[in-house]
Image (cartoon, grey):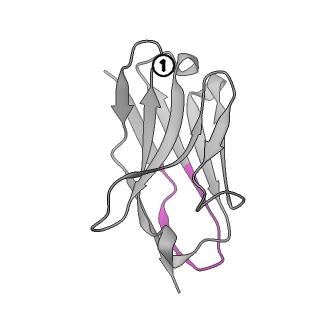
Amino acid sequence: QVQLVESGGGLVQAGGSLRLSCTVSGIFFSRFDMGWFRQAPGKQRELVAFFTKSGRTNYAESVSGRFTISRDNAKSTVFLQMSSLKPEDTAVYYCNAHGATTGREYWGQGTQVTISS
């Protein structure tokens, strides 16, 4: 059974920081591209950042320079370090695992991030 378990969400003031973690089980973690998505109320889910199995990273323009994605293949965990947080970063953040060769995709249950102004 594949599981993606996110943690680290919460309520912080604007300008603060949070670190999200997503620990994965049930798949060969190192073979998957890992990403963070978010969905704010009334909006579509959007890609925040991804970290491919080959080591390439990319960020949404809205978070570039403030967020950093990293992964620890030995611990099957992907992280999202978020700094200089803004109220518009408020959303449910989801971890995603995507098999580039198989096309298989898995999602975590989401963790709420709320930024107060």
Nearest the eye: 75 or 42? 42
In the image, residue 114 sits, relative to residue 92, either above or below, namely below
Q: Secondary structure at mark 1?
A: loop
Q: Quadrant of residue 111?
A: bottom left
- The residue where tag 1 is placed is 100
Query: Is 112 included in the stretch rendered in magenta?
Result: no
Instruction: Give coordinates of residue 27: x percent, y percent.
Output: 44, 18
Most distant residue in the left direction: 42
Instruction: Give coordinates of residue 35: x percent, y percent.
Output: 51, 39
In the image, residue 93 sits, relative to residue 97, either above or below, namely below
The image shows a total of numbered marks equal to 1
Instruction: Give coordinates of residue 63: x percent, y percent.
Output: 61, 60
Instruction: Give coordinates of residue 25: x percent, y percent.
Output: 44, 25
Most distant residue in the bottom direction: 117
Q: Quadrant of residue 99?
A: top left
On screen, residue 53 versus residue 110, left or right, reads: right
- What residue do we see at 53% from left, 21% from top? 29
- What residue do we see at 66% from left, 77% from top? 15
Most distant residue in the right direction: 65
Q: Amino acid at mark 1?
A: Ala
- What residue do we see at 46% from left, 12% from top? 101
- What residue do we see at 67% from left, 65% from top? 83
Nearest the eye: 56 or 24? 56
Nearest the eye: 65 or 81? 65
**What range is drawn magenta here?**
7-20
